[in-house]
């Protein structure tokens, strides 16, 4: 029998590569499915296991609130499962962060500027607080409102502890806010607050180079009219600065006139808004 040669037709390279890529895609899909399934099983186990229940709550960065107060404000309590809390969390600012708890703390604790609440495996909650610092008292028709430098209301009619604390906080009179809710920013024009703080800062700068200190004699700064910014000294002298311009010159001159030219029994107005030179008008008009 005559033998025949059979020519072997090799499969084209591009078809081989296509088949190889298809297999790789299938293997990757299977691996991805297995990893997802394993992850899901792990999460379900963690969410059901008492091993991941909250056992400790730690707070750092606060001088105003206890750990128990912050925990109550956040809605977190021991015994709850940490993973359930993470996955029931509506707000997710970051990995293992509890955004809902952070928001609740900020809403319920007026002195809290920023809160970071994290779940640490297996059973710890870490609360990191950045607090607002009292900067001034706003006199609202005789009712004191304690605010920070950004105008956020910390307390209504606060109880100030030491005499040093009372004297160190400047008193500001300005337009009346429409509402006063602790933890919220007062709807007072920002320029009015900034101008008041600028006046107080300038008084401190002038006091730093003078022997006679004026700041302890200041009753309040009134910025309700930005064209006629005023402050009161010893409840008897009103200093009208006009606009918040050339403050260092005006306040330095006011300090000198108050200590050297105005009698201790006189009452009246020292006006810097009427011209180049200040004018003192005694209350009697003399």
Image: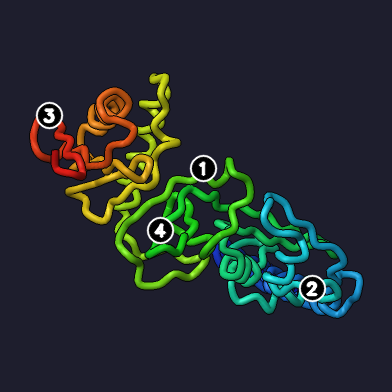
Q: Earlier in the sequence, mark 2 or mark 3?
A: 2
Real-space CA distance between mark 1 and mark 3, rounded to the nearest whole angstrom: 31 Å
Residue at the extreme left: 275
| Direction from residue 92 to residue 210 in the image, left or right | left
The image position of residue 165, as x and y in percent, is 57, 44
Q: Earlier in the sequence, mark 4 or mark 2?
A: 2
Mark 1 is surrounded, within 10 Å at the Cα level, by few (under 14), some (14 to 19) or many (20 or more) other residues, namely some
> Which color mode does the image show?
rainbow
Q: Earlier in the sequence, mark 1 or mark 3?
A: 1
Can you say which quadrant of the picture contains the N terminus?
bottom right
Mark 2 is surrounded, within 10 Å at the Cα level, by few (under 14), some (14 to 19) or many (20 or more) other residues, namely some
Mark 3 is surrounded, within 10 Å at the Cα level, by few (under 14), some (14 to 19) or many (20 or more) other residues, namely few
Real-space CA distance between mark 4 and mark 3, rounded to the nearest whole angstrom: 31 Å
Name the residue located 76 percent from the left edge and 77 percent from the top edge.
84
> What SS does tag 3 mark?
loop
Real-space CA distance between mark 4 and mark 2, rounded to the nearest whole angstrom: 39 Å
Q: Which residue is mark 4?
A: 139
Q: Nearer the viewer, residue 264 or 58?
A: 264
Instruction: Answer with the quarter of the image where residue 195 lies.
Output: top left
Q: Earlier in the sequence, mark 4 or mark 3?
A: 4
Eyeballing the image, is 157 above or below 44? Answer: above
Q: Are marks 1 and 3 in contact (CB under 8 Å)?
A: no
Q: Nearer the viewer, residue 81 or 255?
A: 255
Q: Nearer the viewer, mark 4 or mark 2?
A: 4
Q: Which residue is mark 1?
A: 167
Real-space CA distance between mark 2 and mark 1, rounded to the nearest whole angstrom: 40 Å
> What SS does tag 1 mark?
helix
Q: Which residue is mark 3?
A: 277
Q: Which residue is mark 2?
A: 77
Q: Earlier in the sequence, mark 2 or mark 1?
A: 2
């Amino acid at each position: 029998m005559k033998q025949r040669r059979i020519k072997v037709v090799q499969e084209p390279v591009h078809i081989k590569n296509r088949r190889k890529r298809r297999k790789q895609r299938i293997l990757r899909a299977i691996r991805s499915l297995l990893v997802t399934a394993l992850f899901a099983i792990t999460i379900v186990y963690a969410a059901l296991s008492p091993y991941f229940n909250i056992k400790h709550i730690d707070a750092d960065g606060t001088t105003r609130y206890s750990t128990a107060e912050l925990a109550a404000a956040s809605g977190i309590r021991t015994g709850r499962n940490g993973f359930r809390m993470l996955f029931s969390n509506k707000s997710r600012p970051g990995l293992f962060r509890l955004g809902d708890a952070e928001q609740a703390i900020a809403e319920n604790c007026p002195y809290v500027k920023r809160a970071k609440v994290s779940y640490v495996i297996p059973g710890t909650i870490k609360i990191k607080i950045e607090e607002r610092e009292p900067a001034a008292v706003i006199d609202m028709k005789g009712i004191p409102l304690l605010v920070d430098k950004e105008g956020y209301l910390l307390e209504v009619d606060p109880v100030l502890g030491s005499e040093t604390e009372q004297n160190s906080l400047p008193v500001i009179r300005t337009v009346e806010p429409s509402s006063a809710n602790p933890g919220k920013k007062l709807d007072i024009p920002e320029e009015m607050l900034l101008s008041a703080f600028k006046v107080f800062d300038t008084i401190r700068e002038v006091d730093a180079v003078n022997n006679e200190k004026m700041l302890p004699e200041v009753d309040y700064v009134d910025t309700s009219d930005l064209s006629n910014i005023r402050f009161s000294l010893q409840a008897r002298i009103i200093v009208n600065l006009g606009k918040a311009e050339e403050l260092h010159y005006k306040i330095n001159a006011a300090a000198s006139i108050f200590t050297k030219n105005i009698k201790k029994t006189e009452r009246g107005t020292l006006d810097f808004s009427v011209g180049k030179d200040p004018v003192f008008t005694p209350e009697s008009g003399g």
